[in-house]
Image (cartoon, coloured by chain):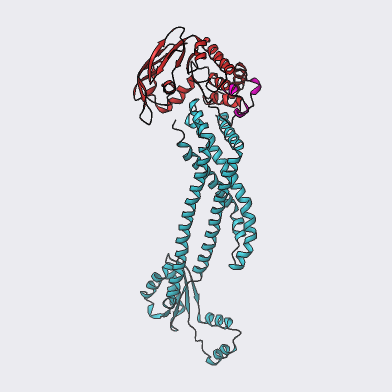
Amino acid sequence: MIELKDICAIYEDEKEVLNNVSLHIKDGEFVSIIGPSGAGKSTLLRLMTREILPYQGQVVIDDVNIVDLPSNAVPLLRRKIGTIYQDFKLLSNKTAFENVAFAMEVCGIDEHEINGDVPKVLDIVGLSNKMNSFPHQMSGGEKQRLAIARALIHRPRIILADEPTGNLDMVNSYDVVKLLTKINELGTTVILATHNREVVNGIGKRVISMEKGKIIRDQIVNGKYVL
Amino acid sequence: MKGHFRRIFMAGWTNFKRNSYLSFGTTGVMVLVLMLFSGLMVVNFLSSTIVGSLEDKVDISVYFKNEASEVEIGEVKGQLENLNSVVRVEYVSQGQALSDFKERHAGDALIQESLAELGDNPLQASLNIKADDSSEYPAIVEFLEANKFRSLVDKINFYENEQVIKRVQSISSGMRNWGFLATVILSVVAVLVTFNTIRLTIYNQRQEIEIMRLVGGSNSHIKAPYLVEGGMYGILAGIITLFVFYPVVYFVSPKVESLIPGVSLIGYFVSNGFQYIFLVVFVGVLLGVASSFIAIRRFLKI
């Protein structure tokens, strides 16, 4: 369960990006957050991984207010959440296998388990033939599938996807959304921030619309891209 | 635990290999820094040798009147030897002084003839005193002046040599102080150059570090491979420095020996080879690891 209570956040230029945002997401939900650029979608996700802190309000994940989390506990929080970004955020000097393995290594998982799990998850995202390729040797769609594999590897209960289709063509976007939907069907909470109308309308689940740092609409069932 | 260390080491090694251009550049800069350290060691060795040989030439002699007996001179010698500042006291009897003099001027017929004409021994018994530091001589002279056997002493040559001793002292302390200052300044410059080079290397990888943080890497997980990488720069730079330094010293050593007789650079660095190799590699590793440690800290605040 994720709950945001009266969140206000500003960036370094003191511009307010979130203004009194409150939100409740149940376990296993698929939530699309839509809105124009600068609406505060990415900021909302960054609050959940504690990349930034609000100046007011609470971010509660599994009954823990992560705003008060000591900094040495932040890596543990991030290991429970899988994150997918528009710019993939892959380690450029590591192979596909090593990129996924790194997420397991930081959890202290032993080599034997890593060697068993990484090929399986790369197979799920259709990258079993790219195991030893570096990110610069892969296409945009492959990079994003690799990022999804990395997000999935430690079986997180929450996946945060920030514009995952932003750099992809229609075919690859469809593949990525299909993967996210499948992951959600297996019980993982998925929060997708996007401004891709076709993607959102194709999913047909909860849709939250944002504008100027506020939630302006929350369609709980069969939501559509409406601003 | 063993697997954890192996993983850290392998991650550091992989980084080192895959960032070969950066690794090459950073190692190159560290080689220059370690060469500078080695150069400072050579300069320190040469200056301390020169200072040592200069100071070794400084001593004072106390000449006794002819009525002073050997027993009385022996007593003064004993008292001097008991002083902490005195390293050595050598007794030269009248006879010994004469035979030394004759030997020294064996080729000078005029002196030999003059001595023969005199018939009597004109030279005096003396004590040659060597202090562990030339600054101690005034205190030793003061001790002699206040001694109960002062009346037996004819002359202390300190007063004639005082200016020379002071000059040697000022050259020695000048070389020591300026040498120390130069070493400190150049060492600081070397450390800053290394630190800045490694900082640039890590700055180049700041996005990687940010990603590691975002996928849940703890500070120690992220830091450790970079520290290993820093250590590897140090080890490699140390080895390259040794391979360059010893042949250079080997070729330069005879030229130095022709300028400063009795000083063998290669001899010094071969006989102290183990310490030197350890020092160069240790300084390299320390510089690499410490610079990485400081440089990476600012990128771990995401």
- Number of marks drawn: 0
Locate residue B135: give its quadrant: bottom left
Q: Vertical placement of B71 versus B36: above or below?
A: below
Tint of chain A: red
Q: Name the outermost residue toward the bottom.
A: B117
Seen in the picture, residue A29 relative to B145 is either above or below; the reply is above
Specify whether residue A136 is painted magenta: yes
Q: Residue at x 65, y 55 (%)?
A: B247
- Quadrant where the image shows the N terminus of chain A: top left
Q: Nearer the viewer, residue B268 or B192?
A: B192
Identify the residue at the far front of this view: A227
Question: Is B286 in the magenta?
Answer: no
Q: Is residue B227 visible?
A: yes
- The cyan one among the chains is B
* Range shown magenta: A126-143
Residue A185 location (% of width, % of height): 52, 9
Left or right: A118 in relation to A36: right
Residue B214 drawn at (x, y percent): 48, 26
